[in-house]
């Protein structure tokens, strides 16, 4: 698979959920109650689950799990056994659960994997993919301003229509013949996204309210102390669903992946901003301070290490990461700053922070903005490592790039993608927005961030 796809105040649980995130009854419960999906031709399918995965460019529908009434022999299946409307079937296999795991020879679930390159795969659709990047990302003029509530993206419901075009054989040899019935998914499973909880924070200090997503480590033990990562989204996610920061790209969910959690158990906090917080005037709304108060609130609620809190963000969120580090120097131990900038006249306090900055050289505002900031940091006597990277690099090449940069043992690392290397061929996405589609696919940077401490 391509690597690009690849509480001062009170907190209350958010009621309800968007249809895209599903509220379907688990398959085991459907079986027990006898309320499985039924179809006109009386076939043996009990239900279909749409499986989604988040990539650098956003959430996509990547598979359909077909639940049968008996275990199916996976050896009898092929990519021609099923067809899915407007989608390309890439792999078919059996599993014992509705998961992407090709290890079970038999199983009641048949997993029909779909190409994430299909146009119909995309569940996050942004209106800011091409042309002049938005000001809310810290780039260009005429974009959204502080307080603007216009959503820059849309979440599409995860649905698919499937037909069993070929025969299916059970583990005991019973043959289920092909069918012309078009079956529609009746449940949704959002990989990693479903592991976050949604809450609302009412901040008495600012009077503002923030909806937010929180990932709690699976084996959370209040007797232990955990790091926390704050992710702040860009302007395209303003005023969409609470789960917007989780589906628009990898900035939040990458830290909560099973692989990252195995290396670094951590809380992940992702607010959803109902309005643009900061623009190129660098005069943030009170949601800026409410975010700092939210971090403190979550820290008090759980066993979180105050010396190991980290911030990251893209575009508007990157600007906020820089601004919060300047105004609240003891709030975060390190920051991963992706495609954002801040006035260099205010940047001197950043010389005392651990930073990893990543931007594209053809990002016409964030790149020179970050160059100006690092110049100030160096003038303050802080060492800065710099490098140009190819945004088309493989995972192994990026890992080598990170190792090379870490070898300098500097508190600030500034890497820039070479001009023309982050925008996929044929895409209308700006280099600005394409930066974070690649940036959060590089685990070595996250590992470096998680090793820093106040």
Image (cartoon, rainbow, N blue to C red):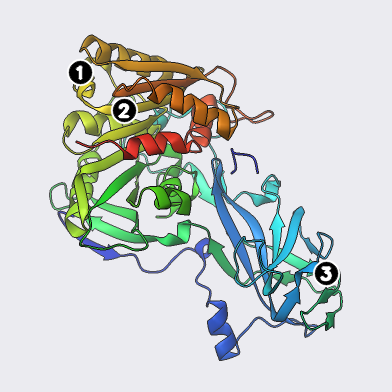
Circles 1 and 3 in contact, beta carbons < 8 Å? no
The residue located at (24%, 36%) in the rendering is 333
Taking 141 as reference, is 127 above or below it?
Answer: below
Looking at marks 2 and 1 on the same chain, the residue that comes earlier in the sequence is marked by 1
Looking at marks 2 and 3 on the same chain, the residue that comes earlier in the sequence is marked by 3
Q: Residues within 10 Å of mark 2 (few under 14, many from 20)?
A: many
Separation of marks 1 and 3 at Cα, in angstroms: 65 Å
Question: Percent position (x, y) of residue 151?
Answer: 45, 44
Q: Which structural element holds mark 1?
A: helix
Q: Which residue is mark 2?
A: 355
Circles 2 and 1 in contact, beta carbons < 8 Å? no
Separation of marks 2 and 1 at Cα, in angstroms: 13 Å
Q: Which residue is mark 1?
A: 348
Give the camera-side residue of 34 and 105: 105
User: Which is closer to the viewer, label 1 or label 3?
Assistant: 3
Looking at marks 1 and 3 on the same chain, the residue that comes earlier in the sequence is marked by 3
Separation of marks 2 and 3 at Cα, in angstroms: 53 Å
Residue 227 relative to residue 162: left or right:
left
Circles 2 and 3 in contact, beta carbons < 8 Å? no
Question: Percent position (x, y) of residue 82?
Answer: 80, 65
Give the camera-side residue of 389 and 128: 389
Residue 429's tag is: none
Question: Percent position (x, y) of residue 99?
Answer: 59, 64
Residue 306 relative to residue 399: left or right:
left
Q: Is residue 167 visible?
A: yes
Residue 76's tag is: 3
The residue located at (63%, 83%) in the rendering is 36
The residue located at (35%, 52%) in the rendering is 265
């Amino acid at each position: 698979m391509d690597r690009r796809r690849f509480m001062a105040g009170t907190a209350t649980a958010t009621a309800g959920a968007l249809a895209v995130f599903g509220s379907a009854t688990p398959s085991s419960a459907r079986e027990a109650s006898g309320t499985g999906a039924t179809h006109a031709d009386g076939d043996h399918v009990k239900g279909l689950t749409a499986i989604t995965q988040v990539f650098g460019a956003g959430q996509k529908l990547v598979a359909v799990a077909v639940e049968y009434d008996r275990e199916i022999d996976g050896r009898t299946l092929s990519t021609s056994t099923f067809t899915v409307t407007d989608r390309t079937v890439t792999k078919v296999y059996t599993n014992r659960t509705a998961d992407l795991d090709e290890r079970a020879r038999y199983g009641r679930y048949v997993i029909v994997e779909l190409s994430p390159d299909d146009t119909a795969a995309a569940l996050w659709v942004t209106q800011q993919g091409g042309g002049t990047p938005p000001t809310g990302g810290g780039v260009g003029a005429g974009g959204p301003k502080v307080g603007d509530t216009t959503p820059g993206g849309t979440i599409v419901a995860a649905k698919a229509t499937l037909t069993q075009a070929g025969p299916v054989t059970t583990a005991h040899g019973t043959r289920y013949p092909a069918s012309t019935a078009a079956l529609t998914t009746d449940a949704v499973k959002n990989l990693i996204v479903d592991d976050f909880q949604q809450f609302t924070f009412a901040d008495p200090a600012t009077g503002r309210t923030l909806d937010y997503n929180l990932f709690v480590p699976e084996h959370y033990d209040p007797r232990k102390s955990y790091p926390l990562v704050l992710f702040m989204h860009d302007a395209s996610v303003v005023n969409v669903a609470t789960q917007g920061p989780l589906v628009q790209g990898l900035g939040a969910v990458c830290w909560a992946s099973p692989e990252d959690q195995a290396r670094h158990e951590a809380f992940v906090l992702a607010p959803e901003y109902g309005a643009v917080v900061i623009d190129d005037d660098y005069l943030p709304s009170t949601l800026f301070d409410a975010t700092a108060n939210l971090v403190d609130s979550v820290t008090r609620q759980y066993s979180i290490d105050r010396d190991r809190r980290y911030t990251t963000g893209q575009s508007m969120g990157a600007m906020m990461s820089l601004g919060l580090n300047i105004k609240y120097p003891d709030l975060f131990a390190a920051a991963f700053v992706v495609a954002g900038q801040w006035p260099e006249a205010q940047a001197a306090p950043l010389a005392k922070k651990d930073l990893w900055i990543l931007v594209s050289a053809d990002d016409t505002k964030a790149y020179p903005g970050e160059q100006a900031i690092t110049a100030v940091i160096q003038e303050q006597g802080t060492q800065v490592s710099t490098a140009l990277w190819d945004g088309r690099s493989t995972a192994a090449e990026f890992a080598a790039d990170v190792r090379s940069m870490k070898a300098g043992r500097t508190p600030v690392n500034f890497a820039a993608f070479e001009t023309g290397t982050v925008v996929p061929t044929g895409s209308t996405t700006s280099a600005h927005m394409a930066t974070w589609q690649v940036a959060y696919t590089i685990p070595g940077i996250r590992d470096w961030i998680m090793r820093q401490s106040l």
